[in-house]
Amino acid sequence: MEIQRAVEIFNSKDTFKVNLGGESVWIEHVDQQNGMATVQVGSRPTNTLTVNVDRLKEGE
């Protein structure tokens, strides 16, 4: 995923399907300067990862 698209999804009021390695994630923060995103994996708020934005896939 491109960094700008990750920012758009994060700032949107709509819900978008985003995956990381086949698992559904929610984007919680986007670090545009470093190309990184903090995501929540699944439904547990404590299960977060910080990953390179290009590892995220939309709509899969």
Image: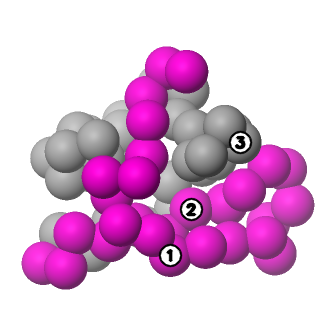
Going by the numbered disc 2, the residue's amino acid type is: Val
x, y (%) of residue 8? 25, 40
Question: Residue at position x 36%, y 39% from top?
Answer: 9
Task: Point out the residue furthest to the front here.
Answer: 21
x, y (%) of residue 30? 33, 66
User: For residue 39, which numbered disc appears in the image?
Assistant: 2
Q: Quadrant of the C terminus?
A: top right
- Local SS, label 2: strand
Going by the numbered disc 3, the residue's amino acid type is: Glu
Q: Mark 1–mark 3 contact, CB under 8 Å?
A: no
x, y (%) of residue 57? 43, 36
Residue stretch in magenta: 33-60
- Local SS, label 3: strand
Q: Is residue 32 above or below residue 26?
A: below
Q: Quadrant of the N terminus?
A: top left
Q: How far is the residue under mark 1 from the one under mark 3?
A: 14 Å
Q: Mark 1–mark 2 contact, CB under 8 Å?
A: yes
Q: Specify whether residue 11 is in view.
A: no
Q: Is residue 49 above or below residue 44?
A: below
Q: Specify whether residue 40 is in view.
A: yes
Q: In front here: 37 or 57? A: 57
Going by the numbered disc 1, the residue's amino acid type is: Thr
Q: Mark 2–mark 3 contact, CB under 8 Å?
A: no
Is-magenta flag for residue 46?
yes
Q: Earlier in the sequence, mark 2 or mark 3?
A: 3
User: For residue 23, which numbered disc appears in the image?
Assistant: 3
Question: Residue at position x 57%, y 47% from top?
Answer: 20
User: For residue 50, which numbered disc appears in the image?
Assistant: 1
